[in-house]
Image (cartoon, rainbow, N blue to C red):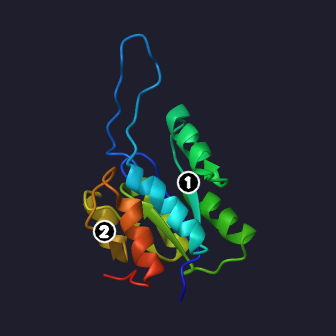
Amino acid sequence: MRIKLIAVDVDGTLTDGKLYFFEGHSEPAKAFNVKDGMAVHLARRAGIIIAIISGLESRAAKERAKKLGIADAFFGVRDKAEVMRKIMEKYGLKRGEAIFLGDDIQDIPAMEEAGLGAAVADAVEEVRERAEILLKSRGGEGALRELVERAIKNECFT
C-alpha cells in the first residue's frame, strides 16, 4: 500500500527533545535539522502529505511549519489520535495509508490510529515495541528525512 500521509510529533522527533532556556526568554529554543526540511519538499513532490501533531505549544515549531508550508500543523494537542483521525478523514485515507512518527508514549494512540507507527532510534521502549517502522536516525538527526525516503521507495517495514 502506498503511503499518502506522514504525521510527526515535534519534540524528540523533529528535534532532539532538548529545550534550551535562555535568560530573559520564557519560550525555549529548539534546533531543527535541515534534512527534515528537505524531507517535506521531497514528500510533497512524491505526493505525500506531511502533518505535525504536537502536544506542546511552540512558537519555534509553528514558525518552522509555516516556513515549510505545512498546512496541517496542530499544537497543544491533548488527543493526538483524534487529530490523526480528522486529518485522515480530511484526505479520505484508510488506516495503513498513513504513518505517525513518534518517540514517547503519548504518541502510541496516534500511531495506532494511522495504522502504521514509526519510531526514532532513541524512542522509548514502549514506542519502539509498537512501531512497525524502526528508524536508524535519532530525533533531531534527520529522522523525518529517513522516513520520507523509505516511504518514497516503499520500504516502510523493518
Residue drawn 54% across the image and 72% down it: 114
* Disc 1: which residue: 52
- Circle 1: is it few (<14), some (14-19), or many (20+) Cα within 10 Å? many
User: Relative to 27, is 119 on the left or the right?
Assistant: left
In which quarter of the view is residue 16 placed? top left
Above or below: residue 26 compared with residue 146: above
Which residue is label 2 attached to? 135
On-image quarter of the C terminus: bottom left
Q: Count residues near mark 2 (Cα–Cα under 10 Å), then give few for <14, some for 14-19, many for 20+.
A: many
- In the image, 129 versus 26, the foreground residue is 26
Please, what is the three-letter code of the amino acid marked with disc 1?
Answer: Ile
Q: Which residue sits furthest top? A: 24
Between 73 and 131, the one lying in front of the other is 73
Please state the horizontal and vertical placement of residue 122, each as a whole percent of the image: 25, 57
Residue at horizontal 34%, vertical 64%? 127
As displayed, is residue 57 above or below residue 95? above
Task: Name which quarter of the figure residue 52 lies in.
Answer: bottom right
| Contact between labelled residues 2 and 1, with CB atoms less than 8 Å apart | no
Compared to 7, does 57 lie above or below? above
Measured Cα–Cα span from mark 1 to mark 2: 18 Å
Image coordinates of residue 144 in percent, x first then y, are 41, 61
SS class, disc 2 = loop
Label 1 or label 2, whichever comes before in sequence order: 1
Label annotation for residue 112: none
x and y, in percent, of residue 51 in the image = 58, 58
Q: What is the secondary structure assignment of the residue under circle 1?
A: strand
Identity of the residue drawn at 42% across and 10% down: 24
The image shows residue 100 at horizontal and vertical percentages of: 49, 66
